[in-house]
Image: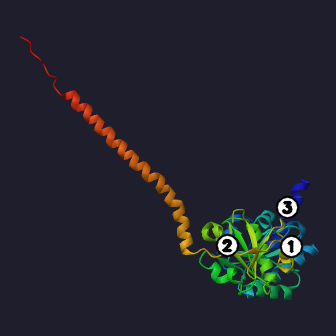
């Protein structure tokens, strides 16, 4: 009975603290929420931090959420909260203490690392993070945009090569690093599943992989750490500790045709002779069968002796 009373009191305090906020606590509502607008904010909160409506922590948290919601509404950004730790960890790589704020721009998330109690700093950050700084490259745009093989005159590029559903929890870190280093390097994605020419050009077999293109050279990020600070240190200094590779030349149309031909021609060299041989054997067998049939049907000579 005592446990039931405690549960009811906790439920009432939870409802009081979050009742008039949009809540995202399951994957399906999350997908619907992020697709309903190009700009969305989700604040992940720990419901156990609020024990009762008269608790100071509970009142402060509610006041803070109301202020953040007001900032978002005034900037035409959708606002919601979530108490689902699994969603925070699985989709946004959020671990540790809460609350944490995630800002999604057309589905690309970035995590605010400052104090949520500082509304001026948060407002400035929302304005800076509103425009997504990362790029999406493909077979057609890669060389034109990066000019990687000609010396990267457009600047340094740090590119994440990945498969379609690879490492979704990595995206918030990648986006946050791009925001912090917006004046140092250009960050981009390449979906290897849909861009086979890029995959062949850079021999990309083990994914995801990160490559820094700098002044006509390329440097592979070999660390197992996917932390923001690790990416920053690599771009600023640690790239010097790995081997500098020459950027492979862009594959020409003739090279691509030659590669396809090299795969197709051997097949024809095997298949066509086999077809011809089978046809010859078929003709020989058919002729032999007709000859036997003719011989069998012929009337034998009879010699009459008187």
Q: Is residue 287 left or right of residue 99?
A: left
Residue at 74% x, 74% y is 22
**Which residue in the protein does label 2 denote?**
190
Element under disc 1 = helix
Element under disc 2 = strand
**Which residue in the protein does label 3 denote?**
8
Can you tell which of label 1 and label 2 is closer to the viewer?
Answer: 1
Residue 12 is situated, as x and y percent measured from the top left of the image, at 83, 66
Residue 96 is situated, as x and y percent measured from the top left of the image, at 88, 67
Q: Earlier in the sequence, mark 3 or mark 1?
A: 3
Q: Earlier in the sequence, mark 1 or mark 2?
A: 2
Residue 34 is situated, as x and y percent measured from the top left of the image, at 68, 74
**Which residue in the protein does label 1 denote?**
241
Residue at 93% x, 72% y is 55
CA distance for labels 1 and 2: 25 Å
Q: Residue 45: name its quadrant.
A: bottom right
Q: Is residue 155 left or right of residue 291?
A: right
């Amino acid at each position: 009975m005592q446990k039931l009373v405690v549960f009811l009191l906790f439920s009432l305090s939870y409802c009081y603290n979050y009742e008039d906020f949009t809540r995202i606590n399951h994957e399906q509502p999350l997908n619907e929420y992020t697709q309903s607008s190009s700009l969305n904010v989700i604040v992940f909160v720990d419901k156990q931090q609020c024990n009762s409506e008269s608790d100071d922590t509970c009142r402060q948290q509610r006041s803070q959420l109301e202020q953040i919601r007001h900032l978002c509404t005034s900037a035409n950004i959708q606002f919601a909260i979530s108490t689902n730790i699994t969603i925070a960890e699985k989709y946004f790589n959020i671990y540790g203490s809460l609350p944490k704020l995630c800002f999604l721009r057309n589905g690309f998330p970035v995590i605010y690392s400052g104090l949520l109690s500082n509304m001026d700093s948060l407002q400035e950050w929302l304005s800076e993070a509103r425009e997504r700084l990362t790029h999406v490259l493909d077979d057609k745009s890669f060389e034109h945009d990066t000019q990687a093989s000609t010396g990267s005159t457009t600047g340094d590029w740090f590119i994440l090569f990945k498969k379609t559903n690879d490492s979704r929890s990595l995206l918030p870190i990648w986006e946050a690093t791009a925001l912090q280093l917006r004046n140092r390097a250009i960050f981009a994605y390449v979906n290897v599943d849909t861009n086979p020419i890029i995959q062949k050009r850079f021999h990309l077999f083990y994914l995801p992989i990160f490559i820094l293109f700098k002044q006509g050279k390329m440097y592979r990020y070999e660390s197992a750490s996917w932390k923001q600070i690790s990416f920053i240190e690599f771009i600023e200094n640690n790239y010097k500790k790995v081997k500098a590779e020459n950027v492979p030349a862009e594959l020409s149309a003739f090279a691509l045709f030659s590669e396809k031909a090299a795969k197709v021609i051997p097949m024809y060299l095997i298949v066509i002779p086999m077809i011809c041989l089978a046809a010859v054997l078929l003709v020989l067998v058919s002729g032999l069968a007709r000859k036997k049939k003719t011989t069998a049907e012929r009337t034998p000579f009879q010699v009459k002796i008187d």
